[in-house]
Image: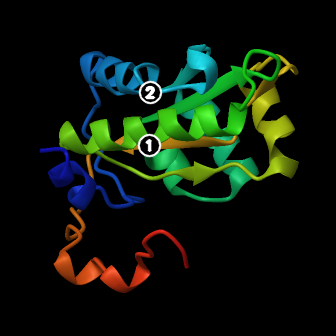
């Protein structure tokens, strides 16, 4: 049942130096490509960054060390004119990928790229100006595995049926 991956998926910001295989990267991206998209257009593309110099440059812009410590960065992008709901399409693809990362025994975190930094990160990645990125997934073998969510984290009080 997928609830296991949902419970286990926790943010990981500390990675071992163990490599992430090409097969693992492809499985993660496959999960992103299989995500639902507005009007079924499936226009999300992915930039895979393994080069340490590039990761260092991105880290300099974003200011968070785990960006350069991850073995790979996966950056979902979409042409602004290729999607009627680009932020939603990128978000759904990213969540699918985060769940697949956990299913593979790896770790990741949704690394937001603030709007004012997107252009600078886009230049580092040679992203066409008509494309949008909102986040990236630093992926690697977790230095330590965070505890999964438990029933204590579930709250029936946050559920409203029919009306508030």
User: On the rendered image, what quadrant is the C terminus found in?
Assistant: bottom right
Q: For this rendering, which residue is in front, 12 or 40? A: 40
Residue 1 lies, with reference to residue 44, above or below; the image says: below
Residue 35 is tagged as 2
Q: For this rendering, which residue is in front, 102 or 151? A: 151
| Residue under the image location 23 percent in, 70 percent down | 149
Residue 47 lies, with reference to residue 152, above or below; the image says: above
Q: For this rendering, which residue is in front, 73 or 56? A: 73
Residue 143 is tagged as none
On the rendered structure, is 127 left or right of 105? Answer: right
Q: For this rendering, which residue is in front, 16 or 6? A: 6
**Residue 72 quadrant:** top left
Judge depth for marks 1 and 2 and give the one in front.
Answer: 2
Question: Answer yes or no: do the residues labelled 1 and 2 have beta carbons within 8 Å?
Answer: yes
| Residue under the image location 62 percent in, 26 percent down | 38
- Residue projecting furthest to the front: 162
Residue 95 is tagged as 1
Residue 143 lies, with reference to residue 94, above or below; the image says: below
């Amino acid at each position: 049942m997928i609830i296991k991956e949902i419970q286990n998926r926790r943010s990981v910001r500390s990675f071992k130096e163990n490599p992430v295989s090409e097969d693992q990267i492809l499985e993660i991206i496959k999960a992103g490509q299989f995500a639902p998209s507005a009007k079924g257009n499936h226009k999300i593309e992915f930039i895979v960054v393994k080069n340490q110099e590039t990761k260092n440059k991105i880290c300099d812009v974003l200011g968070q060390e785990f960006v350069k410590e991850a073995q790979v960065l996966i950056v979902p992008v979409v042409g602004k004119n290729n999607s009627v709901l680009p932020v939603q399409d990128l978000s759904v693809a990213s969540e699918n990928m985060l769940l697949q990362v956990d299913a593979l025994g790896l770790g990741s975190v949704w690394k937001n790229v603030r709007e004012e930094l997107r252009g600078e990160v886009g230049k580092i990645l040679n992203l066409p100006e008509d494309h949008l990125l909102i986040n990236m997934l630093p992926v690697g073998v977790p230095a330590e595995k965070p505890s999964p969510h438990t029933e204590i984290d579930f709250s029936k009080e946050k559920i409203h049926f029919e009306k508030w």
